Image (cartoon, rainbow, N blue to C red):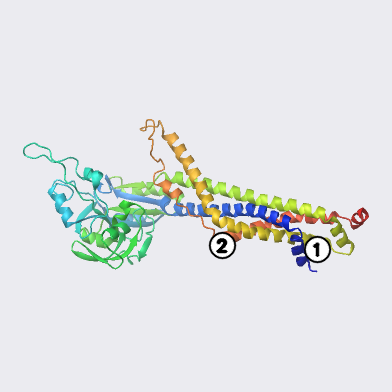
Amino acid sequence: MSVLARSIGNAFRNKVRTAAVVAVLAVAIGLALAMLVANQAVAGKVAELNASVGTVLTVNPAGGQGFEGGGEPLTAEQAATAAAVPDVSTVVGTKALRLRNAAAAAVDAGAGGPGGQGGQGSQSATTVTTSLTAAVDAGTLGTRNQAAEGTTGATGTATAAPAFSVPVTATGIGAEVDTTGKALELTQGTGLGDYTVVSTGALLGTTLAEKNDLTVGSTFTVKDQSFTVAGLFDAGTAFGNNALYLTLPTAQTLAELPGELSTMIVTVNSLENVDAAKTALQAALGTDAADVSQGERNLETAVSSLGSVKNISFIAFVAALATAGLIILLIMVMLVRERRREIGVLKAIGAPNRTIGLQFVLEALVLVALGSVVGAAVASFASGGIASALISSNTATATVTTMAGQRGGPGIPGGMPGANPLGGASQLLTSVTASASPGVIAAGITAVFGVAVIGALVPALLTARIRPIEVLRGE
């Protein structure tokens, strides 16, 4: 009988014990694989954040921010200056538009709201008409924000402020990225192709398209020009989905402001160079011409929290792997003691130590293989839940720690109950998806087999110490 056949037969000699050993190994291996999957998922998310949002700087006109403030508009020449700053990878210019349909514009103009004589207007965005209807109702907050107070008639009687409409946010972009520098993720359709030329294509938020009964291929108008829906995107928020994207030259043409930019999205080549690039960029553009700001500063807290999850999951993976190795070691030591007579007989008839040792190693690998099959199935179902639990726990800890640091700090007496100090970064923590990919599972099982070989070699070496004459004399 070959060594392999004898090893497989020995593995199933005691079926009850084999089942128990496989069950215990399956739990240990399943936990190890689940932790490895969670570790890889978090590592990928950290790399994604460091390579995208964490390296993005936003340049606004000095004294301006979004639709508010003053200052002079940015220009294409300033974009070229920014691109020449050391460590800057890309510079994407944007041009903001506010779109209102004709009926809403008439109401707002008559009430003295935005677009009317009494409105404040915008320093960084141009208002134009469109056939689209906003997907977000103004409501109390929108009306209050657009009309500070009601009007007063000739008799002195105060009248209620009229209902205003929320504008549709349109952004001309020079590359397929959103206003935070992240790549646009389309749910349907395609991109706009060349973002540096005038185009009649547009990308619409899903709720804006639904509100106007538009799908990919449908048309709408902006400033009496027809545009075709090339694709739909989901920004994840009601405000973000009440928006559309055009190519940058198209937005500048609609605004009749060629070469003018509302903002610039600057990507730095690495997270380590962000601070230096920010300083150099501000110096190159001038403090009187532009304000350079980094995205969410609390992103560092998010990445730090994810890094903690990554470390915890790796330590748990190593611990589970060591546990599996210890189980194999103890089982094989027990088997060597039980089979002393069998080993003595094999050595008496001339079987070399390496053959006997190989038999025990193969037997251990058979048990590990069975445990790995069950453990992989366990990991495929449990890895997502385990990763979510680890991330939720660390998110709560980070939130409590940050609030404790804020409480009583300058300008925040007593803290702000109910506020999330991590801001939008908390959503980044919970957006990690752990999936048991074949590559990760294969890597984990390879590590398990490596530990199994090490755990089986120790009792295999014990066989070299068994002297046939002592075993046979004991019989």
Tell me what residue is drawn at x 11 percent, y 39 percent: 152
Residue assigned mark 2: 438
- Residue 338's label in the rendered image is none
Q: Residue furthest right?
A: 473
Q: Secondary structure at mark 2?
A: helix
The x and y percentages for residue 170 are: 27, 56
Q: Secondary structure at mark 1?
A: helix
Image quarter where the C terminus lies is bottom right
Q: Nearer the viewer, residue 20 or 304?
A: 20
Residue assigned mark 1: 355
The x and y percentages for residue 285 are: 31, 50
Q: Residues within 10 Å of mark 2 (few under 14, many from 20)?
A: few
Q: Measured along the vertical axis of the image, is residue 401 above or below residue 389?
A: above
The amino acid type found where label 1 is placed reads: Thr
The amino acid type found where label 2 is placed reads: Pro
Looking at the image, residue 254 sits to the left or right of residue 303; the answer is left
User: Quick check: can you spot residue 69?
Assistant: no
The x and y percentages for residue 172 are: 28, 59
